[in-house]
Image (tube, rainbow, N blue to C red):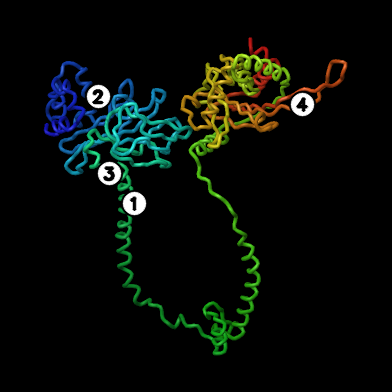
Amino acid sequence: MAYASHIINHSKKLRNAPKFLWHEHAILVRWFSKDAQPSIGKRDDIWKIRRRCYWSSERETASRSATNGTIAMFGIQKRNMSMMPMEVRNPTVGLAFNQRFSRSQVYLRRGFSSDSSGLPPHQEIGMPSLSPTMTEGNIARWLKKEGDKISPGEVLCEVETDKATVEMECMEEGYLAKIIHGDGSKEIKVGEVIAITVEDEEDIAKLKDYKPSASDAGDAAVKGSSTSSPPKEEVAEQPVSSSEPKTSKPTAAPPVEDRIFSSPLARKLAEEHNVPLSSIKGTGPDGHVLKADIEDYLASRGKEALATAPKARAATPAALDYTDIPHSQIRKITASRLLLSKQTIPHYYLTVDACVDKLVDLRGQLNSLQEASGGKRISINDLVIKAAALALRKVPQCNSSWTDEYIRQYHGVNINVAVQTDNGLFVPVIRDADKKGLSRIADEVKQLAQKAKENSLKPDDYEGGTFTVSNLGGPFGIKQFSAIINPPQSGILAVGSAEKRVVPSSGPEQFKFASFMSVTLSCDHRVIDGAIGAQWLKAFKAYVENPESMLL
């Protein structure tokens, strides 16, 4: 009873909730009581208490799942109050992100004051999980300082994920009492505490020297288990060592056995050349070392020194001049995903050459209309994206991904476009590219490419793609290349540059010039058979060589 009343009176939020105190104070106390049972007629009243995160440890410990997420409960058992980390997806407590990041996991843990620790009520904010592949993150910068008042909707800090930089917002009033990981902190594991918040401003000073207790306890447990095992080994070895003195006395090494017999001349010669007699095998009577033995040893040592001298010089080449560049988050995730792709996906490649003369002519006509209307120019890559999207709609087997139980075929055509920046490789997505016009595709590609260069892409800007287009021909002049599939997708199109070739002509002239572009389709053989990949390339080539059909 006393502890329940203490928590109610101590919490600022409960003090500011008069309706809750007047109508449900007795109910909450009965829930904390050891022997009392709740005599509540309405189930909604019990649920209100449960949503306040208080629960009787003798009835249930752990957590209760709600329809809109998971709400953690605190176990109160007799006089010791305990806390457990919780995964918060309910927007009623703690920190959260914009609605577009509703799938993110935010790790929070609330603590109460106790006589032993002397800490005021506080809340530990953990590193959130902002993408399916995120295991750790970096703190780019804090927009709030220690001691600042925080309100719902304000941005606390910027978190660098494995793919983008995301703003972290607060949905609960309070004060930022302690920043555990400051600006530029690297490789913070998901769930690790990064900051502490309190409800009352006077509690900030009490948490000045605060350190996360959960991690310390974990480290102590590991250290305790590692240091507790050696004494057992020592105890087991003591009986063996205690029995050794009884047998070691008669087996003391006699000094006669360590003596090396040699002639006076050999001993003098060995002293002059600093040769230990113990390293020479004597050839005299009873193993005596003779002068000849010393001379043979000196001769052999001289030959070895001459033979090893060139090797020693060759083993020390000139030092290389280099600079170690730390891995960025996007570089780490790109490396791990591409390695996973090459190790687990059976790639095969199909290449075709498509004539792009009509495509270039159509682009010129469309750009004339765009300039007249004030729109943005359309690039060859925009036309390629449109042709790839229409080919995927025509051959939907290529718009699929592999799972262990089934092949998932997507109904929407979302094209990822590879964009190279100074920070690494990004693949923003054009959603429903088969249903959008060329002008809109051109606008979205330019906007997403600019956001990628500014490292400001959001998860909605790059997640959910079903196929990828990578173009190294236009910007870099690469004739042909093979791209690595971006999992979980099953195909990626590598676009090369266009070049003029001499081809046969049916007119009065026997030959003419035409521009051809080489494209290579990388396929996952688990999903796309060779004939299916060939059908897709045939459809893609038809759209490129007859671009008017894309406008129908």
Sequence order check: which comes first, mark 1 or mark 4? 1
Secondary structure found at label 4: strand
Q: Is residue 90 left or right of residue 497?
A: left
In the picture of the structure, the residue carrying the numbered disc 2 is 51
Q: Is residue 42 left or right of residue 506?
A: left
- Could one spot residue 136 in this view of the protein? no
**How far apart in space, not on screen, are marks 3 and 1 (Cα)?**
26 Å
Q: Is residue 89 left or right of residue 12?
A: right
Residue lying farthest to the top in this orientation: 552
Query: Given the image, on which type of amino acid does mark 1 rest?
Result: Ser
**How far apart in space, not on screen, are marks 1 and 4 (Cα)?**
70 Å
**Tags 2 and 1 touching, CB below 8 Å:** no
In the picture of the structure, the residue carrying the numbered disc 4 is 500
In the picture of the structure, the residue carrying the numbered disc 1 is 226
Residue pictured at 57% horizontal, 33% vertical? 420
Query: Given the image, on which type of amino acid does mark 3 rest?
Result: Tyr
**How far apart in space, not on screen, are marks 2 and 1 (Cα)?**
41 Å
Relative depth, front residue between 545 and 259:
545
Mark 1 surroundings within 10 Å by alpha-carbon count, few (fewer than 14), some (14 through 19), many (20 or more):
few
In the picture of the structure, the residue carrying the numbered disc 3 is 210
Residue pictured at 30% horizontal, 56% vertical? 232
Secondary structure found at label 2: helix
